[in-house]
Image (cartoon, rainbow, N blue to C red):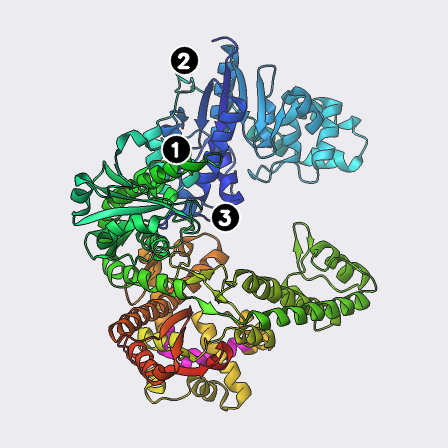
Amino acid sequence: MAGRLLHLIDGSSYLFRAYHALPPLTNGEGVPTGAVYGFTKMLLKIIRDERPEAMVVVFDSGGPTERHARFADYKANRAQMPDDLSRQLPYVHRVVEAMRIPLLMQQGQEADDLIGSLAKQAAAQDFHVTIATSDKDMLQLVGPAIRVYDWMKEKVYGEAEVLERFGVPPGQVVEVMGLMGDPIDNIPGVHGIGEKTARSLIQQFGSIEETITRLHEIKSAKVREILRCQVEQARLSRDLASIMTDLHVKLDLGQVALQAPDHLALQALFRELEFTELQRAFTPVTSRSCLRMVVIDREEGIDDAARELLASDSVAIAVAFSGGGTADGELYGLTFCKESDVVLCLLPCPTPGSSLECLRPVLAGEEPAKIGHDLKRTMAALAKEGIVLGGISFDTMVASYLLNPTRSDHSLAAVVLEQLGVVGPASVSKGTEGEDRREEAVRRAAEEAHLAWQLKNVLLPKLEQSGLLPLFKTIEMPLIEVLASMEEVGCRVDTDQLGELGKELEIQLGQVESRIFALAGERFNINSPKQLADVLFQRLKLKPLKRTKTGYSTNVEVLQRLAMTHELPAEVLNYRSLAKLKSTYVDVLLRLADRVSGRIHTSFNQTVTATGRLSSSEPNLQNIPIRSEVGRRIRQTFIASKGQWLLSADYSQIELRILAHLSQDQALIAAFTAGADVHRSTAAEIFGVQSAEMRRRAKVINFGIIYGMSPFGLASELDIPQEEAALYIERYFQTYRGVKAFIDRTVHEAREIGFVSTLWGRRRAIPELKSSDHVVRQLGERLAVNTPIQGSAADLIKVAMIAIFRRLRLERLGTRMILQIHDELLFEVPDAELDVAKRVATEEMERAATLRVPLKVDLGVGTNWAEAHA
């Protein structure tokens, strides 16, 4: 064993470092995981970079030690371990055990002393020891066979490095620390002596005892007097800082060789904690050998094996494209799967339409029921071939999203890794061409179908157990067909108008840029935060308001406040706004508009937001400004086709109506039932008047309450003193006492059970409520109140969309739903159907739910979106 490399890991030190270094991560069950993740990454990095032959991880056991007996205030300034960190300790221990690394803890002993004793024993047995820690007091242990590795700084300390750091050799580090003290462990040291003086004294005298003996040789009378008065404190501090090296350690150094980890245990643990990257690293790749491939002959059509499979009650389906993961490009093939080992592949001819005809009854029919991952994408691919996919039954991507809506990745690879513990099929190699590429893509799709079948068997019971199955069946699954239809239809845009608007914005940007340079007295890169900060705070001498890691902040909030005192920040805000509108909307819409039809086909994302709201991408149409002139001009470019109208149907104050229902507040219910203007009613109660300005303020308060706005936030929004804002909020809750009770009740229940639900049972975990960080807890309280309201509004409009879609099809109307933006639906309506479309939209939206207050829909009609929305 001579010369073997042994790493001793100060687990307690790195656990705290990981906890404070990373944001408060949680898994879908609300279990805090950030410290576990950081600790695990540290452990793996040491193993990868240092390649130790042996390893031990050491933790404090908690409770009093011998040092506490000598000095009652030892570590007294350390706060109690936060609850969200203590909850992670068992998981950290499980990581170490699954890595098959010895874990050392002994009651009444600190990790430092266990490490010190083990290091000395190991060095005596010809180990080369590396102590992985960030605690500087461990440097006293450094010697010929012992070094310290600070993982955070990626620095190794040998004897030379310790001498450079403290000015004394390792054996005298504890003497320096005895004089200077250690605030982290509440070791007092000698009050009045800092590190510089301590180093100088030990360099001169060698130890605290020798310094005390030769006090008369110290030149400074002040230092002499300080030491004379604190002799015993210096000795005590040195003893407290001294690491014990003679403890009986209950560990056999012959059993510390690094072993191969328990892959199955790590897979299960990382799946539970939702560490996708780490899970993938310890997970085997799926094997294609488990699949029985049955290929349909291109000329002869479906054989007996295919007919038997497609006659099943349900099959999993996946498609292969030349474009890889998107529905763009050539359709290479279709794959079907039933059970765990039967997959059918179709390799169509270069003209796939004719090849697919034999499958049309199966694809378009309600049977077999279709299972898949991202079935909307499959529907889009088949729609290009003239086939409407029917009988969609179970989308594993949507199921994963419902179970964990705060997870950012619901791709097949991520869900398979989380739910099945395997790495999904690799993408088609870029170097593959021709028939080889076609066959590889179809084989990959076959694996996707196979995995989707397995996922359904895992996800369905989880949906049932969590009470999410009704939401899945009645809203989310039917919505897929609605969204696929909306994406296929698209929205027509006037590209000529867009082009003109783009030119106008280009001119305006140039004009604003010139004004900015004139005000600054020089040209600079307006988009560079550093250069802008130099102009604002160095050249113009404006007062900085917020500092970041890289300098002074120039974010929107800072510029808005600075704009009150100088014109340049206001112009920069104007520049940023115009530039964003041009690049995000005008340029993108021009690029994405179909050159023949002039239509935009956005993608509606069903599995993105934590509240259940839909989002859109390529392009994002959810955030086009409503109130700005440029935003209105952009909406004007969305036009109806010839002989048609755009119909806007918008829920009126839907979130406030849902708040009234959930809170059962009698004042709110009475106002909505009477058809009163709720903002005017609120203005009358809070301000005593109903003027336009007071109504505006009341509207801010009404919606601010939903989003948990604080007095500070309200003061900033209304530009009033914070005390006045606090008074308004107090008056609001005095008027709407039911709302206050609802907020308090909702936060309390969410803290107890860990999640909140919408009216339709959609769940969202709120782990932030149990954070030790006050700011994070406040965020959790806002999420707990807002999610049931905003999530219920999202569910409501989805219910309405499904009902309207079915009714339009049932009545065989030419009206088409083309956009959903938050609480608004936009339709393209033939002129002859306008009255019918108005009636259908109003009826289905207003009876989508029965609340304690009536639902109201505002309608608008126009030749463009701006007219219709107005």
Near mark 3 (Cα within 10 A), the count class, few <14, some 14-19 or many ≥20, is few
Q: Quadrant of residue 243?
A: top right
For marks 1 and 2, the one nearer the N-term is 1
Would you name the residue on which mark 1 appears? 95
Image spot of residue 710 (x, y percent):
50, 69
- Image check: 516 left or right of 471? right
The residue tagged with tag 3: helix, strand or loop? loop
The residue tagged with tag 1: helix, strand or loop? helix
Is residue 138 in view from this perspective? no
The CA distance from mark 1 to mark 2 is 22 Å
Q: Between residue 404 and residue 869, name the one nearer to us.
A: 869
Q: Between residue 712 and residue 393, name the one nearer to us.
A: 393
Image spot of residue 338 (x, y percent):
21, 42
Would you name the residue on which mark 2 appears? 254
Image spot of residue 542 (x, y percent):
76, 65
Q: Residue furthest right?
A: 521
Which circle, 1 or 2, is nearer the viewer?
A: 1
Q: Is residue 732 magenta?
A: yes
Tell me the amino acid under the disc marked 3.
Pro
Would you name the residue on which mark 3 appears? 23
Q: Is residue 830 magenta?
A: no
Q: Which residue is drawn at 40% across and 43% down?
A: 86
Near mark 2 (Cα within 10 A), the count class, few <14, some 14-19 or many ≥20, is few
Is residue 776 in view from this perspective? yes
Image spot of residue 250 (x, y percent):
39, 20
The residue tagged with tag 2: helix, strand or loop? helix
* Dominant secondary structure of the residues highlighted in magenta in the image: helix
Which range is magenta? 725-740
